[in-house]
Every structure is written in C-alpha cells, then in structure tokens.
Image: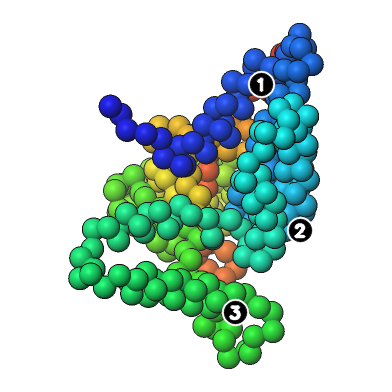
Amino acid sequence: SHGKLKADQWRTICLINLVIMLCRIWGNPNVSPRDKELLDNYLFLVIAVQWATTRSTSEQHARIVEEYLSLYVQSTLKLFGSRALVFNNHTSFHVPECLHAFGPAHGWWTFPFERFNSILQCFNTNSRVGEMELTLMRSFCRGSNLRALLKQDNIPAVFHKFTTTFSNSLQPNIEGASAGGGTTSGITDIAIDFDELLILPTDTYNSLINCLNEGLCPLRYISYQDRPRLSTWVVEPRVQEEQMIKLKEATFACASKHIGNSCILFHVSNETSEWAGEIHCIFLHRRHRDEGLVTEHFFVVHQFEELNDTEVARDPY
C-alpha cells in the first residue's frame, strides 16, 4: 500500500542501514567463522560501490574498485558456490573501465535518465517515436564533449575566458538559501538589510577572528571592541544567517533544518586527522582584504565526542 523502494533508496539501505546492522550482528568477537566471512563478503561489495560512486575519480579509485569486486566474487564462490554468480557480476568488472573512459559515475549512471523517462512520459510525442530521444541523446553528447574539450590543458588561449564563463554559468559552486527565504546563486553580497543581520555570539565571534588570522594575510584582524591599531582590520560582528547551501553539488544544512545534511567530516587547520561533527550554524560574512571587500560562508561545527578506550574496544565498526 506504500509503493516500492526506488533505486536510490535501495542504495541507501545497502550502503548505510545494512552496514550498521550487519556489523552489529556479525562484527563482534563471538561470532562463528562463517558469519565473519559473510560480513567480509558483504563489506567487499560495499567498499567497491562506495569507491565507484564518489564525486571524483582517479587511477587509485579504479584499482580499488577492481580489487574489491574481485574479492567479493572470490568470497561469493567460496561461500555459496558458482550458482550464486549472475551476469551482473561480470558486467560490474567493466565499471573500472568506464571510470577511466567517462569519469565519475555521477556523470553517466542511470538515475538522471530514469527521471527523464518520467518526464518524457508526460509529453505528447505525436506518435513520432524515437525522434525526441535522439535529440536528447545528441544534446547530452554535445554537452559532454564540450565539457571534456574545455577541461583540456592545450586548448587555444582564446577559449580561456569562455571556459571561466561556461563554468560559472552552468556549474555554480555555491547556492545558498538565507534565513529570510531569499535564494542566492554564488557568493555575491549580503542580501538583507543591515538592521536584520544577526550579531554573532561572543565565542563564535572570537573563533571567527582566530580563523581569519590563521591565513596568510599580511594584516591582522581584531575585534570591534579593541582599540584600532596600524596594520589591522576590524571584523564586523554582524552576519547573514543561512539555513543551507550547496557546495559543488553537495548540500549542507544546519542541524535545525536537516539533521542528515548537517553531519560532516572535517579537518582542523595544520592537522591531517579527520573529525566528525554537526553543523550548528551557517552564516555569510563580509570583511576587508587587500583586494577589497570579500564575502564568504562560514560553518559553526560542534565536534562529536570521541570514544574512550573501553568504548573503542566494543565498537564493531
């Protein structure tokens, strides 16, 4: 009565929910050897899929995908015999080849085409079968070829300016939705009246100053409460609060807006370790630099508490 799961919902279940559940069931030290092998078998597939569907790709990505697909097939043969193998096991080994040829899977997997099929079903084709599909395919191929051409290093200099315009118009890096409901494409300027801007709490304001002073700017940023000095800039405490932004096709939101889009992994300056946390606030701030006024997004992130030694020993992940 509630319909059936879509392909993307199946992907979420297999890559997130089942991983959590199976690691709890088969990941503890007291399980049988076969249960451990079953868990390894499933995780081989999960690792291959995760690396195959990242938003960027490389030679390393393709090697890892091929390696873990091979481990998955070998463990499947060992656990279930040859009858468990299907045609998809063979076709999956062509995924590394496709990553080499076409780039990240997001550019050529079938989810967009499934949506287009739904849209096409709503059009009156006047019984001219095949012509609309051919037009769409030609346009898609032209766009793909144009993107590939403009990303080459040896294109004539006359196309360089066009490349920047093309990237800015068709592939915006950031889109934001402000707390006041307005939508901005790219980072331009503060969009609401000065009197409506949020005044940062003292701890957040001081953290912002410390963050700005970690850069390579020759001048130093100071608080508006400090006495002005030479070679310093005062940091404005008023900001425009944002509910969510899109950064390179990934959506980030405050925890109060969308808990799923607020959980992130982040790096601390001058450290290589990754930390997990939750976005508490997103704001747009304007400040002075050598080249003039700069407007930039900032995140206020609450870091998750680390497990202690006792809890780490019990962690199945």
Quick one: SS at disc 2?
helix
Task: Looking at this view, name the residue that lies furthest to the top.
Answer: 30
Residue at 54% across, 83% down: 161
When asked about the image quadrant of residue 152, the answer is: bottom right
Q: Amino acid at mark 1?
A: Cys
User: Which of 273/206 is in front?
Assistant: 273
Residue at 40% across, 32% down: 256
Quick one: SS at disc 1?
helix
Query: Which part of the image, by quadrant, shows the C terminus?
Result: top right
- Dots 3 and 1: beta carbons under 8 Å? no
Q: Which residue position holds label 2? A: 59
User: Which of 288/6 is in front?
Assistant: 6
Q: Give the mark nearest the N terminus, 3 or 1.
A: 1
Q: Amino acid at mark 2?
A: Glu
Residue 294 image point, x, y percent: 51, 62
- Report the Cα–Cα distance between label 2 and label 1: 29 Å
Residue 19 image point, x, y percent: 61, 27
Residue at 37% across, 75% down: 135
Q: Which mark is residue 23?
A: 1
